[in-house]
Amino acid sequence: MSTMTDAQPHLVTRSAVVAGPPSAVFAVLADPRAHAALDGSGLVKGLADGPERLADGDEFTMRMKGYRTVNTVVEYIPDARIAWRHTGRHVWRWELAEVPGGTEVHGTFDYSAKRSRRFVELLGFPRRAGRALDGTLTVLQTRFA
């Protein structure tokens, strides 16, 4: 079960505890080949091009349902935080903290850099992003159960 924490404007955040150490959870998040299996939206179909393990500044291309997108790693702290910026200027961020019983994982859809934030909201992207984050957190919890 994830916790909703959408307290800041233009950020959608969900969190859950995953029964694995931060290093193991981070290794999965930093492997773009695993993203399709982790994806809670059903849109990510697989890696089209990119490294086996992401690092700061890396670019990777994902095959999506009906299109491709280029992402750039914009935040990178090993075993603690990884974030990539999508072609559309929004950021998917994963923050990890060791807690009793495993790792607290915070997933965030950050659309604060988008030029038309109101349009994003009218199209329902924040709501869908929240569901996608919930789905990904559930997959992570199952994977490390």
Image (tube, rainbow, N blue to C red):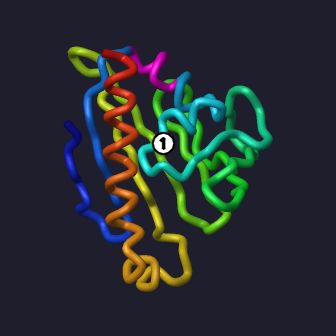
Say which quadrant the C terminus sits in. Answer: top left
Check if residue 19 falls in the magenta segment.
no
Question: Would you place residue 11 above or below residue 1 in this image?
Answer: below
Provide residue 85's location: percent of width, then percent of height: 61, 56
Element at label 1: loop
**Amino acid carrying mark 1 in the image:** Asp
Q: Which corner quadrant of the image does residue 19 belong to?
A: top left
Q: Quadrant of residue 142?
A: top left
Q: Is residue 128 shown above or below 54?
A: below
Left or right: residue 83 versus residue 57 is: left
Quadrant where the N terminus sits is top left
Q: Which residues are magenta?
A: 21-26
Residue 79 in picture, x, y percent from top left? 50, 24
Relative horizontal placement of residue 39, taking residue 143 as reference (left or right)? right
Magenta region, main secondary structure: helix
Residue hosting label 1: 39
Indicate the position of residue 88 as horizontal and vertical percent values. 62, 68
Return the residue nearer the eye: 26 or 65.
65
